[in-house]
Amino acid sequence: MKKRFGIALSFMLAAGTLLGGCGGQGGNNAGNKDTFSVAMVTDVGGIDDKSFNQSAWEGLQKFGKDNNLKKGRGGYDYLQSSSDADYATNLNKLVRSDFDLIYGIGYLMGDAIKEVAKQNPKKHFAIVDTVVNEPNVASITFKENEGSFLVGVVAGLTTKTNKIGFIGGMEIPLIEKFESGFRAGVKAVNPKAKVEVQYAGAFDQADKGKAIASSMYASGIDVIYHAAGATGNGLFSEAKDLKKKDPNREIWVIGVDKDQAPEGMVKVKGKTYNVTLTSMVKRVDVAVYDVAKRAKDGDFPGGKTLEYGLPENGVGIAPTQDNIKPEVLKAVDQWKQKIIKGEVKVPTNRKELQQFEASLK
Amino acid sequence: MNLNRLNQFFVPVLAVLLGMIVGSIVMIVSGYNPIAGYSALIYGAFGDPYYIGETIRQTTPYILSGLAVAFAFRTGLFNIGVEGQLIVGWLVAVWVGVSFDLPKVIHLPLAILAAALAGALWALIPGILKAYLKVHEVIITIMMNYIALHVTNAIIRSVLSDEGFKSQPIHESASLRSDFLDAITYHSTMHYGIIIAVIGAVIMWFLLEKTTKGFELRAVGFNQHASQYAGMNVRTNIVLAMVISGAFAGVAGAMEGLGTFGNISTKAGFTGIGFDGIAVALIGGNNAFGILLSALLFGALKVGALEMPSSAGVPTELVDIIIALIIFFVASSYIIRLLLSRLQKGAE
């Protein structure tokens, strides 16, 4: 027994030295650099969340292709967080890999970006969806309330039961912005419609999204808008299941962040339906590309807050509009012009929503 | 006995090796280079002071949650509620850290003790139910986890913030972070909690092995009827064991609240530290010093894995599989143990 143990031990040690020896090379190939490099840290959703993180990554990929960068160190890359404890570690990892510009994708990463940016004042950072007041951080925010208002108009004019649903991810001010804008849009065109609001409590739990959607559709709601990231995938799967059972039933999903029309495709007896009414697109990709380009050109907007709204095409309704009636589209366009001209101020939280509703009467 | 001791050390090591070998097969099959993968893993865990700092930071709560699980194990209880007790401890530590303004010598210990107390109270309920009503502790502790998660979320929203999703940052006087550690580890999130965790391990060892009470607790775990016959109060001992286990879990939460994060945010799901604590305790053989080592293994795996996608190109999902394989082999070490004993018998 002792002999066997000794052999095992020496094998262990040998393996350790071997692996340890290789280890050194892993981190040190970032030294020489003549190209601009850029990377991002995703939230727990990952780059295939069919929503927010994916959109950001598409922006970076496009930037990489346009500038002949390679994926990886010295080019463009991403790291995925598996919990909130990973945010700072991942950001630091990118700092230490010597990327020129580092994105934190998502509201929840605000604290981590602030801390890491303070520790590395010479590095450039950008945060999407919240504001971090540091001279080396560019804050990218969107007027989600304006985009949500427009899909609210679509929902209000499309519903037949006058019951509309909203599924939020976590109950945070950012998602309240979606909710308030959406409810305002519905109320503006259809005062009789009721919007039921539910929060799933998470951005990555499709099963919860499906359960909420199931009870909403069962209660007679026919249009549901979600601002819940990957949780919203459950909403799509529920709507498609219902459509499979009864293709004549008119139920709709309004997607978020990206054009989610591909998520709503369902085939019933050889006929293709799409449960996606439209989507509120938030062009994270455009903003990410934009800031990367500016940083590359030496015009990094550090310490500034960039707001992407309707006029900047940062938010809006998706290009896939097959399921929307023409008169509804016309109404959407009218409201869009009103918002751009400043005639309508879209509420950003529930308090402003109450004032908005009062002003309609 | 001597052979047994040796096995206790040898089995987990063999399990880790087996896990790594199967992990490398998975990597080869999926077209990645396992040597590059594992080099990245090791570099990402111990490569330079920053990574070492992060590994130690990750190890700290693992030690304490492992101790919590192991303490209950040794006294015949299966505390699945470490996760919930940890969350409650985290909340209370931050609460104390935010609401008081005291000198550091009082404030920091107060916050940690409050967290321990909170964890202990959260474990007291299943303890009493088990001791007096014979309700199985596994069921209650699992349920208590959910209660803890959602109650703390509600408190964070309504009490610790104005309908927000996170609390204020704790005052400097309650923080475990230090400029010194920050400087020597190049801004890692490492904090002084590791010292507390090691002290916790010593306390557990001393309590269980060197005191009469510890003997009683273990005796009740081995055989309730015999202990009762010997004149021990079985019920109080069960409650006490749960409470102490919960206190360890509460302190693990304090490490996150006072060290790593410095605040608490609403959680969509469990932190996983409490559940990983079960694996940590198993790998560590429910032994205080074994747990120090197995917690370090877990910490290194978790932190090192973050390096695998960026420098070896191994996708995150594959990294999860490899880590799970290692844990799987360690957890199924019973099989290895059985094989070894067969081999030994054959040799004799």
Image (cartoon, coloured by chain):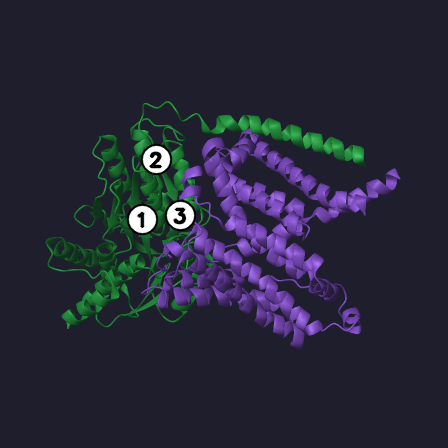
Chain colours: A green, B purple
Q: Residue shown at 57%/31% (left/top)?
A: B34
Residue that numbered label 2 is attached to: A61
Q: Between marks 2 and 1, how big is the CA–CA gap?
A: 18 Å
Residue that numbered label 1 is attached to: A259
Q: What is the number of the mark on residue A282?
A: none
Residue that numbered label 3 is attached to: A43
The reply to the same-chain question for discs 3 and 2 is yes
Q: Earlier in the sequence, mark 3 or mark 1?
A: 3
In the image, is residue B155 above or below residue B256? Answer: below
Disc 1 is placed on an element classified as loop
Q: Quadrant of the C terminus of chain A?
A: bottom left
Query: Nearer the viewer's eye, disc 3 or disc 2?
Result: 3
In the image, is residue A332 above or below residue A2? Answer: below
- Residue B224 placement: quadrant: bottom right
**Chain bearing mark 3:** A
**Chain bearing mark 2:** A
